[in-house]
Structure formats: structure tokens, C-alpha cells
Image (cartoon, rainbow, N blue to C red):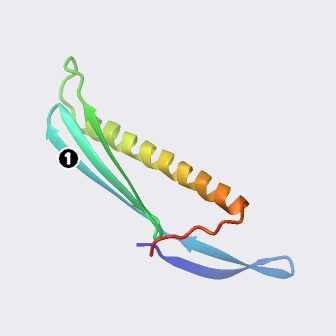
Amino acid sequence: MTQQRSAPKKHGTAQARTHTKTWSLRLDIQEENEDLTRVEAALDTGRRTLRSSTTAHRNPQDPPAPEIGDEYAAGRALLELGRQLLREGTTDAEANARGIEKEFPG
């Protein structure tokens, strides 16, 4: 859920408003076995939800360490969400530059 707050902020003699938004990130980490970790990630911006699904596989020559699989799979999921967010931002900026108002769900 996204929360927005506004508060007046003084800059010289004029007052500017700041806006704080809260985006929610959820990472569901599933250790399938000692060799495989899956992560389902969702970023809710309040106007859209971006999702990614990733895995990490243990190298058979390494000793089992599920925490490392969690880190790799979660890191990959976050990187994918970042790529999606940058693509969305680029698309929105291009539409804005052309004067096209984008509809957002919600």
C-alpha cells in the first residue's frame, strides 16, 4: 500500500511542498531443497505492481548453505524489478515528453 504525505518546506521566502511516498516490496523466499531457492518478488507503487520470479542453484561442489541461495535469488529478483522500473520510467518519460498523459490503474 502506498502512503503519501505532504508538508510545507521553506526555501527562502517561498514555500515548497514535499511529498513522501511509501512503496511496498514483498519477497517470498522458498527453499525447494538444499540445491534450489526460488524468490517471488512484488513491488507495489500504489499505481502499479511490478513482479519478478528468480532462482538460485547451488554449485554441486559447494557445501549446502541455504542463506547464500536466498541472497543470490533475492538479489536477482531485485535486479529484475530495477530493470522493469527503469523501463517503465523510460516509457513514461517518453510519453510525457510527447504530451501524452498515461493512465495508471487504481
Q: Position of residue 50 (x, y in %)?
A: 41, 57
Q: Position of residue 6 (x, y in %)?
A: 61, 81
Residue lying furthest left in this view?
33
Q: Residue at x 43, y 44 (%)?
A: 80
Residue type at mark 1: give it: Gln
**Vertical order, 77 against 6 (above or below):** above
- SS at mark 1? strand
**Vertical order, 103 against 91 (above or below):** below
In this view, the residue in front, 48 or 101, is: 101
Q: Is residue 2 left or right of residue 15?
A: left
**Vertical order, 91 against 68 (above or below):** below
Mark 1, Cα crowd under 10 Å, few <14 / some 14-19 / many 20+, is some
Residue of label 1: 30
Q: Position of residue 8 (x, y in %)?
A: 69, 82
Q: Is residue 100 left or right of residue 14?
A: left
In this view, the residue in front, 101 or 7, is: 101
Query: Residue 35 sits in which quadrant?
Result: top left
Q: Is residue 69 left or right of residue 89?
A: left
Query: Residue 93 sits in which quadrant?
Result: bottom right
In this view, the residue in front, 84 or 100, is: 100
In this view, the residue in front, 47 or 12, is: 47
Q: Assign the N terminus to one quadrant of the image.
A: bottom left
